[in-house]
Amino acid sequence: QVQLVESGGGLVQPGGSQRLSCAASGRIFSINVMGWYRQAPGKQRELVATTTSDSSINYAESVKGRFTLSRDNAENTVYLQMNSLKFEDTAVYYCNLKTRSGLRWYDYWGQGTQVTVSS
């Protein structure tokens, strides 16, 4: 089993910044993908940014140039630095870890943390 502990989030003004972190523990295999998704009210959950175990990073177009995902492999932790936040960034942000053993992928989610961009 894997546990994901998220921190960060809260209320921020437009144009402001926030940092989210997610620490993973448990049975994590060497091949994995870790990152963040978000879900706004009335919308489907969408990818924000993910990073693979070989350090490849993928961003949603809507956050490119504003958000930065980084990873501490030794601590199995990912950080999402969010700058120039917009109203439309308001959502519950979920940490996600996918890890592979042989041909099987395992998928884990954090409990979610609310990010609210409001003046």
Image (cartoon, helix red, strand yellow):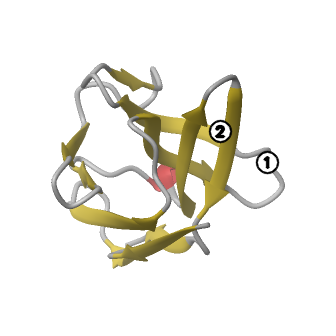
Neighbours of disc 1 within 10 Å: few (<14), some (14-19), many (20+) = few
Which kind of residue does numbered mark 1 sit on? Lys
Q: Nearer the viewer, mark 1 or mark 2?
A: 2
Disc number for residue 43 = 1
In the drawing, does residue 116 fall left or right of residue 85?
A: right
Disc number for residue 27 = none
Q: Quadrant of residue 110?
A: bottom right
Q: CA distance from mark 1 to mark 2?
A: 9 Å
- CB within 8 Å, label 1 to label 2: yes
Q: Quadrant of residue 44?
A: top right
**Looking at the picture, how far across and down is residue 33, in whole percent?**
46, 35
**Looking at the picture, how far across and down is residue 96, in whole percent?**
55, 51
Instruction: Report how many numbered discs are placed on residues in the image.
Output: 2
Front-most of 30 and 48? 30
Q: Quadrant of residue 64?
A: top left
Which kind of residue does numbered mark 2 sit on? Glu
Q: Is residue 81 above or below residue 104?
A: below
Identify the residue at horizontal 43%, vertical 44% (top origin): 35
Q: Quadrant of the N terminus?
A: bottom right
Q: Quadrant of the C terminus?
A: bottom left
**Looking at the picture, how far across and down is residue 65, in whole percent?**
23, 26
Q: Is residue 14 above or below residue 13?
A: above
Front-most of 100 and 36? 100
Q: Secondary structure at mark 2?
A: strand
Q: Secondary structure at mark 1?
A: loop
Disc number for residue 46 = 2
In the drawing, does residue 15 fall left or right of residue 44?
A: left
